[in-house]
Image (cartoon, rainbow, N blue to C red):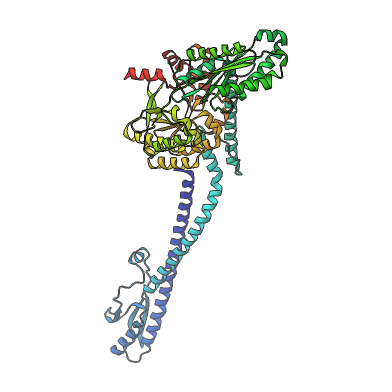
Amino acid sequence: MSLFRQLWLAVIGLTLFAFVGSLLVSVFTARNYLEQQLYMKNLDNAAALALVLTQMPAKDPVLVELMVSAQFDTGHYQEIRLVDPKRQVIVARHYAGEDLGAPQWFVRLFPIEAAAGVAQVQDGWRQFGTLKVVSHSRFAYRELWRGTLELVAWFLAAGLAAGVLGSLLLRLIVRPLRQVVDQAQAISDRRFITVSEPRTPELRRVVLAMNDMVGRIKGMFAEEADRLEVLRREVNHDSVTDLPNRGLFMNRLGEALSDEDAAPRGVLLILRLADLDAINRRLGHGQADRLIQDVAKVVHDACDSHRECMVARTKGADFALLAPGAEAASPLAKRVADALNEQVAAKWSELGNLFHLGAVRYHRGENPADLLALADQALAAAQSEGPNRWQAIEKEEEHPLAHSGEAWRKLLSDAIAEGRIMLARFPVLSSAGQPLHQESAARLQAEPGGPWLVAGDFVPMAMRLKLTPPLDLEIVRLALGELAAASGDIAINVSAEAIADWGFRDSLARELGTQPDLARRLWVEVPEYGVFRHFDAFRDLSATLKSYGCRIGIEHFGHHFGEVPRLAELGLDYLKVDASFIRGIDQSPGNQEFLKGLCKMAHAVGIQVIAEGVQSAEELDVLPRIGFDGATGPAVSERGQAAD
C-alpha cells in the first residue's frame, strides 16, 4: 500500500473516530437532558393533577375519571394511573400507539427512560389515592433523532470540506515524498535522475543523499565512458587523422557486403598519396602530418551526404571511403578529386603530384577481396593518367524494381496496405546457449506473388520517402500477432524517423494498450545514430514503452561513446554492439579490452550486452569471456540449428 494511501487512511480513520466519538457524546448528552426534562415534567404534571383532584369536594368516580381523561387527552402522556391505598385501580389511561418519532433501531440503541411523576391525592385528611404520570417519550425521540440527523449532516459537510482541504494539504506535504519515491523507482529502472530539494528538512536530507548518489553514478559512468572512448580510438582509429583504421574499415566493408539490412549498392573509393616517403623527406614529418590531416578532412567532408558513410586511413599513404547507398562511383570520385585539387593541391602546390583516386560501384553480396582488387585496378588506371587524377568503374546491375520516387512510393504504399510484409526471425542466444528472444527482420513483397525483398532493398527508399512510420507500425502489428500465436519474446527494429513521428508513437501506444500481456514480451530497439539524433523523442518513447512493460535497447551500438553518459536517464534494458567491433574479435586483443570495459560498465547499471553479426564459432566462443550476455548472427543461427 502506498504511503499516500496510508496517510489518507490515517486521516480518514482519525476523522471517523473523532466524528463517532463526538456524535455519541452529543447523542448521550442530549438523551440525558431529555430524560431529566421528562422527569421534571412528569413530577410537575402529577403534582398539578393531584392538586386538582384533591380540591374536588366530592370524589365522584365519574368526575375523577373525566378529569384524568381530560388531562390524558392532551396527547403528551404515555400513561396516567390513579390507584387507591389498597392498590386497586381507580382510573387508568394508557397510550396504545406505536409511533415513536424515530426508527426502531435508533430507539433500541438510545432508549429514553425517564422516571414517572408520582403524587398523592387527598380526600380531606384521608388519602384518596396515588397518582402516577408518565409523559410520552415519542416527542423526545423525535427531537433526539432530528438533532442526530442534523449533527450527522453537519459532520458530513464538515468532513467533505475537510477532505478537500486535507487532499490539497496532503498533496503539498506528499509532493516532495513523491519525488523521492519517483527517484527511487527511476533508479530501480536504471534511470539515474536528480530531483529538486524539498523544503521539508527530513526529506531534504534524503533527497540530497540520493542526488549525491546519482551524481556519483553519473560521474563514474561518464568517467568510464571517457576511458573506453580513449581505448576505442586507440584500438580502432589512426592517431594522426583520428579516422578509423584498416581493421575497423575492413569489418565495416564486410558488414556492408554481407548484411541483408545494408544498402543493396554503394561506392568504394581508394585514395593514395603519391610517394609519401618523398613528401616526408621534403616537408618533414610535422608538415607531412598536417598534409595528411588536410586530405583526411576533405575526404571526410565528402561523406556528409551519406548517412552510413565511413572514411578510414588504411595505410600510411592510403585512404578509403565507403558510401553505402551511393548510386554511382563517378560523381563521388569527381567531387572528392575536385575538393582535393581546390583545397589541398593548391595549398601544397610545391608538391605537384599529390594523389590518385580510384572508385568502384559495388553490390551487396560481392566478395570483399574481389571488390578491393577492382578498386586497386581503378587506382592503377588513375596513376597511369598522370598527377592528381581519378578513375571510376561503374558496374551496372539489372534490378526488377522501378527506381523513380513515385514508383517506389506506390510500391511501398500498396505493399503496406495489402499486408505484403512478413517477419523473418533469427535466434538471439544467451552466453549459456539459452534463447533470449527472436530477432525479427522485415521482408516485403514488391508485387503479389513476387520475391520477398530484404530490408536493405526497400528500407532506404522508405526512409527517403518518409514511409518508415507506417512501415514500422505494420511491423509492430505483425510482431504482436506472432507473439499471440507462439511463446517466447520477439525483438523489432524501429527507425530513427519513426521515433520522432508523434502519429507513430500515438498509434504504437494504442496497439500496445490493447494487448498489454503481449507487450511485455516485445523488445524494441532503435539504431544508435537515431537515438542521439532524436534523443528527446527516444527518451519519451522509452518512457511510453516502459509503461507497457516492453524492453528497450539500442542496436549497432559503439560509435558514439562521447554521448554514452546521456543514456543513464533512459532505463535501457540492453545494448547490441555493432558487428564492426565483433568481426575478428577472437584475434583483436585491443577490441577485447575495450568491449570488456563496455560490458562491465553496462552490467554496473543492469544493462545486458548482446553481440551483433557473429560470423564464426571462434568469435562466439570468446564473447562470454569478455562479458557479453548474448549474441546473434550467422554463427548463432548455426549453433541454434545444431542444438535443435
Relative to 141, is 237 above or below?
above
Going by the image, does 202 lie left or right of 279? left
Looking at the picture, how far across and down is residue 331, in whole percent? 57, 24
Observer-nearest of 363 and 558: 363
**Of residues 263 and 440, which is closer to you in this image?**
263
Residue 388 in the image: state x and y as whole percent.
64, 16
At 63% across and 18% down in the image, what residue appears? 241
User: Farthest residue in the bottom direction?
Assistant: 57
Q: At x 51% / y 59%, what residue is drawn?
A: 161
Residue at 34% over, 86% down: 70
Count of numbered tags: 0
Name the residue nearer the viewer: 61 or 168: 168
Q: Position of residue 80 (x, y in %)?
A: 33, 79
Report the residue that reaches farthest toward the left: 88
The quadrant in which the C terminus is found is top left
Where residue 204 sits, quadrant-wise, is top right
Furthest toward the front, the residue is 385
Q: Nearer the viewer, residue 51 or 191?
A: 191
Q: Quadrant of the N terminus?
A: top left
Q: Quadrant of residue 49 in the image? A: bottom left
Give percent across and percent down for residue 209: 59, 34
Q: Examine the rendering and report whether any part of residue 624 can be seen.
A: yes
Q: Is residue 546 visible?
A: no
